[in-house]
Image (spheres, rainbow, N blue to C red):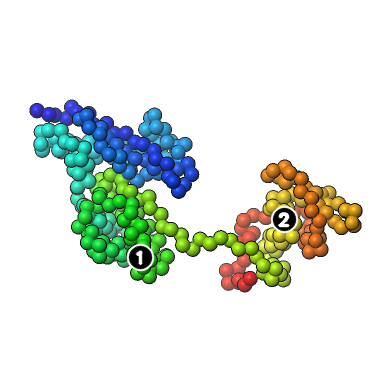
Amino acid sequence: MYLTYLELRVKFWPRYDQAAENVVYLYGQFHYNNQRSGKFSTGLRLPAEYWNSRTQRAKRPYDWMNAELESIKARLMSAKHRLEALTNEPPTPAELIAEFRGKNVSTIPALIESFLQQRRAIGRKETTVNGYAVKLQNVVKYLVKKKQDKQPAATFKASFMNSLYVWMKQEGFDDTTIKVTFSNFRMVLKYGIVSGILIGSPMLHYTVPDDQETPPKPLSVSQLDTLRSTDFKSEKLTLAIKLFLFQVETGLHYIDAVNLREENLFEGKDGKTYFRIHRQKTGTLAVARLTESALQLAAELHWPIPFPKASDYCSLPRNRTVSL
């Protein structure tokens, strides 16, 4: 007669994210009755330096993940006890996983419905829940189209997310709708993990491709002239724009332009004005002639230049635009 003396040992493994440097996903694996399960995703990710593989614990400020990991262990142990009580024999890892994942709901449409009910139960506004439902209905439509609406949620792979994305693009959904749909669906997957319905999900780590990413284009001479002639009616923003134009004229980096002083200027043998400065980042010497436009901007900037903040570049009134 088998009782619960057989030890269930759960261990978590970091796996590096290919798309993000020094970020790891946590995967779990358990040993039971001389058998080993496959690795499963916990749905958790963190910087590699905050995970201690020896103690199997996350460090601050990610220590909140430790409670999630302990919850996974506890739910696996509960599934083990249930199966041992029913069969009076030690279950296989596959049976244990099936028992763990098979509670409450198993299909994605049922998981979505359970998620919406939970949102209402914790007091979310009906308009918010309806917003979730509208976007998540796109996922259900795709599942019905592919006849996957009866398939257990635990069997889906990351490739499903890419197929869903391609379908939504072909159906003409705009980028915002696609991103919100995937964001809401990730919330559903996280709900499934926390509630014990899923042991992680490879779908959780999918990121929507950004089709709008385009390489930056240099400003034309006419666009720079527009910047010079525009009255921004803001002293801080005018200073920031003049500093930017001075960088364009001289080729200096931002911090080097700010660090420039009058003693860095000198007259060359040709009678023209030059500047000489050691670049802060590399320490290399930079020498170049100042154009007439750069000299005019230098006279208007008045060194030492007050160090502009990022907000100075964002102080343009919202009802006013500059067409370049």
Q: Residue at x 39, y 43 (%)?
A: 25
Question: In the image, is 284 to the left or to the right of 138?
Answer: right
Looking at the rendered structure, the secondary structure element under dot 2 is loop
x, y percentage for residue 39? 30, 40
Q: Residue at x 15, y 38 (%)?
A: 82
User: Where the C terminus falls, by quadrant?
Assistant: bottom right
- Image quadrant where residue 98 sits: top left
Amino acid on which disc 2 is placed? Gly
Question: In the image, is 210 to the left or to the right of 119?
Answer: right
Above or below — where is 83 with respect to 189? Answer: above
Residue 157 visible in the displayed image: yes
Residue 231 visible in the displayed image: no
Amino acid on which disc 1 is placed? Met
First in sequence: mark 1 vs mark 2: 1
For the residues marked 1 and 2, what is the alpha-carbon distance in whole angstroms?
45 Å
Between 93 and 190, the residue placed more toward the observer is 93
User: Where the N terminus falls, by quadrant?
Assistant: top left
* Pointer 2 residue: 251
x, y percentage for residue 240? 68, 60
- Image quadrant where residue 281 sits: top right
* Pointer 1 residue: 168
x, y percentage for residue 88? 10, 33
- Residue 72: mark: none
Question: In the image, is 227 to the left or to the right of 174?
Answer: right
Q: Residue at x 32, y 34 (%)?
A: 11
Q: Residue at x 67, y 55 (%)?
A: 308
